[in-house]
Image (cartoon, helix red, strand yellow):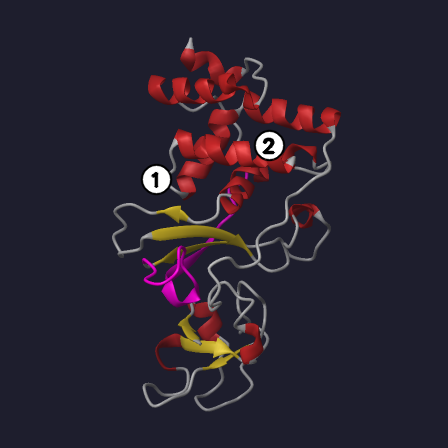
Amino acid sequence: MEFTIDPQTYLAALVAAGATDVGPLTRCPLCQSDLAPARGARHAAGAAGHLRHKHRTNDAGCVLTTSAYQPKELVAQERRDVIVGGRHREHFIGRWTHHYVAARRLLPSLTVQRFATVIAYADVLNLWSCAVLQQEDVPVVLLVLAGFMRLPNDANGAAWVRFWFDTSVQEVEDLWKPRPVPPRLFQVAYREPEFTPFPTGMQVLYWNEVASRPGWLDGPAPELSPAEMAEFRRFVARGRGHLNRGPDDRHDR
């Protein structure tokens, strides 16, 4: 299966048309396998940025080309640790509006209700019990755990969106292991599937690498509407966790 790849950095690594060695930079950004120019009657080698996995066996495992609508997901199941989990979750809840606004910058259609649903899922997974969890990465971890999400009113006609880490991140702890280069995060948008409940690689419409935003949890608590604040407090009151009033709660007083 072929796909259009961007940014142009990958295309710059291509040798002259017809070459078979596409160089070390031309690796699939998500699965890290080698790429090659697509060839066929419809276009010349490498034309218009059309590339494919050099080895077709990699198609099944890459989110850009897989035929599965339930590809391998981030493993975030943790053994419950009351002390560690309680400390991490309390810190998160105390600054929840920072986390929510950070996630909403990446996905403007994200609602507080959806955000709360993903937090509840993280609770089930005992995400907060991860000893090496770093709070500044929680917004993107939650977006990845959210899975496929409806994308309303997309200018390019996308119906679904999903966030993925590159293949170097198989388990959530991999984010914080020593590594020569930081992990990469991608946003993939999909068309509406016709024959499957959720999209596959066949429905990939476009994708973007998401740049890291250091310091997005710093500063005063972001302003949210009274309705949004009330929605989150209802979520907490339903028993999905203990809320200690923190600096982010002053807007709800």
The dot on residue 109 is 1
- For this rendering, which residue is in front, 161 or 67? 67
* Magenta residue check for 155: no
Eye-nearest disc, 1 or 2: 2
Q: Determine the image quadrant of residue 244.
A: top right
Helix, strand or loop for disc 1:
loop
CB atoms of marks 1 and 2 within 8 Å: no
**Residue extent of the magenta highlight:** 192-215
- Please provide percent x and percent y for residue 195: 35, 63
Residue at (58% x, 36% y) in the render? 122
Q: What residue is disc 2 on?
A: 123
- Seen from the viewer's position, the closer of residues 80 and 88 is 80
Residue 232 visible in the displayed image = yes
Q: Mark 1 or mark 2: name the one nearer the start of the chain.
A: 1
At label 1, the amino acid type is Ser
Q: Amino acid at mark 2?
A: Asp
Q: Residue at x 62, y 26 (%)?
A: 89
